[in-house]
Amino acid sequence: MTTEAPLLRLEHITRSFGAIQALRDISFEMARGEVVALLGDNGAGKSTLVKIISGGLEPSSGKVIYDGEERHFTSPADGKAAGIETVYQDLSLCTNVDVVANFFMGREIVKKYFGVPVLQEKAMEEVVAKAMAAAGTKIPSLRTNVEHLSGGQRQAIELNRFVHWGGKLVLLDEPFAALGVEQTRRGLDLIRRIADQGIGVVFITHIMSQAFQVADRMVVIRQGTVAGDVRTAETSPDEIVQLITGEALGGRARNVDQSKGQAQPAG
Amino acid sequence: MLSSNRRVAIEFVLDHLVWFILVAVLVLFSLTIPNYFQIGIFANIVEQSTFVGTLAIGLSLLIIAGYMDLSIESVMALAAMVVGILFAKSGVGFGFGFTPAWLVVPISLMIALGVGALVGASNAFFVVKLKMNSFIVTLAAFIWGRGLVVALSGGRSAQELPAELRFLAIQRFLQIPLMAWVAIIATLVFAFILNRTPFGRHLLMIGGNPTAAYRAGIKVDRLTATTFVLAGAIAGLAGWLLAIRTSGATANLGVGMLFQTFAAVVIGGVSLKGGVGSLPGVYAGVLLLASIQTAINLMGMPAHFTQLIQGGMVLVAVLLDTFKLSIRKRLA
């Protein structure tokens, strides 16, 4: 891994919205197969950063180096074409159509008859069935509209879709906000499995126990800059809380010390 | 938790509710109203459904994509009036002709489609580029469109379209005039586009979750703009058919059809929330309204009863939409 170029490197990224500077100076890098938790208080700039990586926003200055090349994504479609995709909190699925349609959203298999592209439903269903089986995801019927499926099943569809389409870097913005305990556990397993296939995973979360369960590294954003970039194995929830809030080791930090090992809500 | 078989059955009934209602209504009328059960009556219902049926295609596509188009009625009238003014021989018509004479058919059709597409493009510009609310933008077009019809005609009418055009209204196939077949074929063509092509699939997705569609790389703005232009062109087609039927155009041509269309679309199973609907269902909705209107006529009730009932139907249709949504929620 050390000899290989990093999957993603950000160099001095800034982003302003009018007079407001959402990101002041962001630099970090990540390797293939690495799970990075992006932590920070509300308004720290996490979501802005994720949008910049995926192409939803352009940085005001700074470089995005991805897969060994400097990139200038101008839309999520650019990012997607390069293998970067975001799974948002509000789910990137159309619940009014079935699993197969969602899996192929925007990349449908078609056959042209007299120049008219016609959807090849059977062929598409076979591909989805294969992909789902390979990932060990069970869904009663691929022809069910997604509105009838559970939150966990929906997320599995999204992540399987991502892996299937040759994704290299997945960005997850609060992926488990709407899920129950068991579904969250399965989601975390799925993240691990995806990373084991050599895919980079960046995920935003407010729940520190999740970050500690699955992340290899934690990057803490505070007021638009990187306040900390630490390996999970070499840090503790207290240290992360301090990095997030920006409080120096003082009276409060010592109090936090006493609850060492317990999950701390981030904000 | 419902068993999946039962859910599938209920879903099927909800998805095709309008067909069940149509059959029930036709049976009821045939049994209770003297002279209702005749081929001629049924053919007449299909004939009556031509204009609303055509308009409903464009409106359905836009509502499925999550937008609204109130301008269709005025666009139809505008296209009819332009065709009337150019090709009708008396009134405000100039009576332009061609050699060979049949050329008037494709040329007038192109002009009608073009007029509709132009208004559709203007709607698209305001909604897609300027991010204005489609309800307001198309309401404005509904008003100025009709204004333009009156201005162009000076409030007078154009009469006597050439026989080559009238042919479509007079010539019948299986007792149904050719122009009604045009509406049926258009419905089938767009039903195919909606169900079996990427364009239609993406339209459904935009209606379901435009953000997801955008993130998936679907060109949402371009697709939406295209649909507005299409809806305009289809309204133009309806105008062309209506001009042929009435052999010209009057300033108040087609007044009230917007709400009939709206009712038919909702009765036909298109959800106002967007993302749900099928065009054959919508056509069934159109047939249902025409069947009821025919029944009222046959019973010799005064014409204003039609309006009363249509108003009620719109209300019932929206109520049904809400009702179906709550059933589906409970199923999920």
Image (spheres, rainbow, N blue to C red):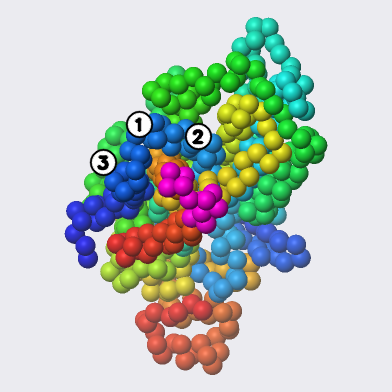
Label 3 vs label 2, nearer the camera: 2
Amino acid type, mark 1: Ile
Q: Is residue A89 one of those drawn in magenta?
A: no
Q: Please, is residue B128 above or below residue A262 in the view?
A: above
Judge depth for marks 3 and 1 and give the one in front: 1
Q: Is residue A47 above or below residue B85?
A: below
Task: Please check whether the numbered discs 2 and 1 fall on a single chain.
Answer: yes
Dot 2 lies on which element?
helix
Asked if residue B309 is among those painted magenta in the image, a careful observer would answer yes
Taking the image as shown, residue B30 lies to the left or right of residue B275, namely: left
> Mark 1 highlights which residue?
B39
For mark 2, name the chain. B
Query: Which tag, 2 or 1, sits closer to the chain's start?
Result: 1
Quarter of the image with the N terminus of chain B in it: bottom left
Work out whether residue A68 can be spotted.
no
Q: Nearer the viewer, mark 2 or mark 1?
A: 1
Q: Kindly report the distance in space between the C-alpha atoms of the residues bearing marks 2 and 1.
A: 17 Å
| Residue under the point 35% across and 31% down | B39
Residue at 27% over, 37% down: A126
Residue picked out by circle 3 = A130
Residue that mark 2 sits on = B50
| Residue A227 x/y as whole percent | 58, 70
Kindly tell me whether residue A133 is visible in this rendering: yes
Q: Residue furthest top?
A: B100
Closer-to-camera residue (B29/B137): B29
Q: Position of residue A123 (x, y in %)?
A: 30, 33
Tag shown at residue B85: none
Q: Is residue B22 toward the left or the right of residue B218 in the image?
A: left
Question: Residue B237 location, x and y as percent?
Answer: 58, 31
